Image (cartoon, helix red, strand yellow):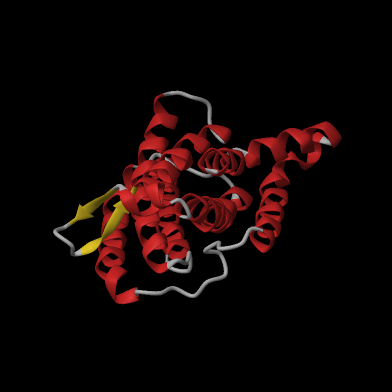
Amino acid sequence: LMLGALLAAVLISFLFKIVQWITGLFDKRFLRYTIYYWGILLIAASLIIKSNYVFHLPRNIPVVLPLCLIILLINLLISRRSGYSPVGLFNRINFVITYPVFEEIAFRGLILPILVRHQSLGEKFTLELGNGLFPKLSLAVIITAVLFAVSHLQYYKLNAESIRFMLFAVSGGLFFGVIAQATESILLTIPLHIAFNSSAALYAYRTTKQQRK
């Protein structure tokens, strides 16, 4: 059963690439819309897979509120060093809104609860954070964060820049995962993810504008 959960997690992690490949077989002109086809499949999956975090209202908000505030502050400090630089309105909108929403559905909304169902991944092996000030970090969250980081190779070639993207992704994945598991919802992680991407895109836009002067 655990092996099945891990295989399902890997499949969902790389579903974007599968959808992209299938789209390319039909008409390469539609490849730029892969993210929307991927999103439709994720929403359909969230209607089929039981016990997901996609449509749940968050629980235990006071428990995660300090962590949310810390993440927002960290977002402002480190997003400018992320290296992300989406070009054009279409790509900026996708980077700021579409990717965060669909990535949260995929990783914290579907994959994480699939893994959390197994006690050895969701409860047995956990780490205390901040002497109990923050929710515990489970093995399920760690696995989800690693898959989230590696999944970025679907969008970028493996090089020094993509490794930096992956490091940001794994750290974000850990924080977002802790919040999602504690609240059993992605309604807090989506705006946090959007906030990080928005800050990174805004900094990249301003930097590019200054360089053109």
Left or right of residue 152: residue 124: left
**Residue 148 versus residue 80: which sits nearer the camera?**
148
Q: Quadrant of the C terminus?
A: top left
Residue drawn where x is 64% and y is 41% of the image: 16
Left or right of residue 59: residue 48: right
Q: Quadrant of residue 154?
A: top right
Q: Quadrant of residue 28?
A: top right
Residue drawn where x is 63% and y is 51% of the image: 90
Residue drawn where x is 23% and y is 62% of the image: 134
Q: In the image, residue 106 lies at what x, y percent?
A: 56, 52
Q: In the image, residue 190 lies at what x, y percent?
A: 47, 62
- Give the farthest residue toward the left: 131
Q: In the image, residue 83 lies at what x, y percent?
A: 39, 39
Residue drawn where x is 35% and y is 57% of the image: 178
**As drawn, 33 above or below 156:** below
- Give the farthest residue toward the top: 159
**Residue 35 versus residue 181: which sits nearer the camera?**
181
Specify whether residue 89 is in view.
Answer: yes
Specify whether residue 213 is in view.
Answer: no
